[in-house]
Image: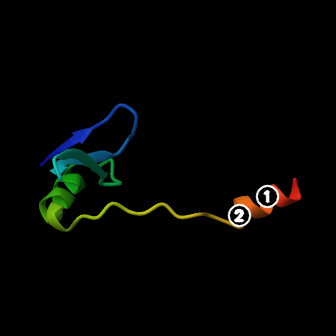
Amino acid sequence: MFLSKSTKSPFYQITFEANGKRTTVSTRTTNKEVAYKFLAKFDASNYKKPIATIKGNSPLLSIFKDEY
């Protein structure tokens, strides 16, 4: 597990392996000292990737199909 910074994001990221795959988690901070504190407290064994949710009032595909 290590701390890195991508050129695509201003935030520091924690990189670790979960289930044989490399995974990154944003620390959501641009301050290196704060990012290292986040790394020290981060528990990779309890990390679960967030599930994407539908935002707003998106119509269901079946309703959309019936209307058009």
Q: What element carries label 1?
A: helix
**Residue 16 position in % (x across, y down):** 17, 48
Q: How many labels does the image show?
A: 2
Identify the residue at horizontal 59%, vertical 63% (top origin). Answer: 54
Q: Is mark 2 on a helix, strand or loop?
A: loop
Q: Is residue 50 left or right of residue 55?
A: left
Identify residue type, mark 2.
Answer: Leu
Q: Which of 50 and 13 is in front in this view?
A: 50
Q: Report which residue position mark 2 lands on.
A: 60
Identify residue type, mark 1.
Answer: Phe
Q: Give residue 20's mark.
A: none
Q: Report which residue position mark 1 lands on.
A: 64
Identify the residue at horizontal 22%, vertical 40% (top origin). Answer: 4
Identify the residue at horizontal 48%, vertical 60% (top origin). Answer: 52
Q: Are marks 2 and 1 in contact (CB under 8 Å)?
A: yes
User: Is the residue 2 above or below the residue 63 in the image?
Assistant: above
**Residue 8 position in % (x across, y down):** 40, 34
Q: Is residue 45 left or right of residue 35?
A: left
Q: Most extreme residue toward the top, as rendered?
A: 7
Identify the residue at horizontal 35%, vertical 54% (top origin). Answer: 28
Q: Distance between the residues labelled 2 and 1?
A: 6 Å
**Residue 61 position in % (x across, y down):** 71, 58
Q: Most extreme residue toward the right, as rendered?
A: 67
Answer with the quarter of the image where residue 39 lies: bottom left
**Residue 1 position in % (x across, y down):** 12, 49
Within-10-Å neighbours for mark 2: few <14, some 14–19, many 20+? few
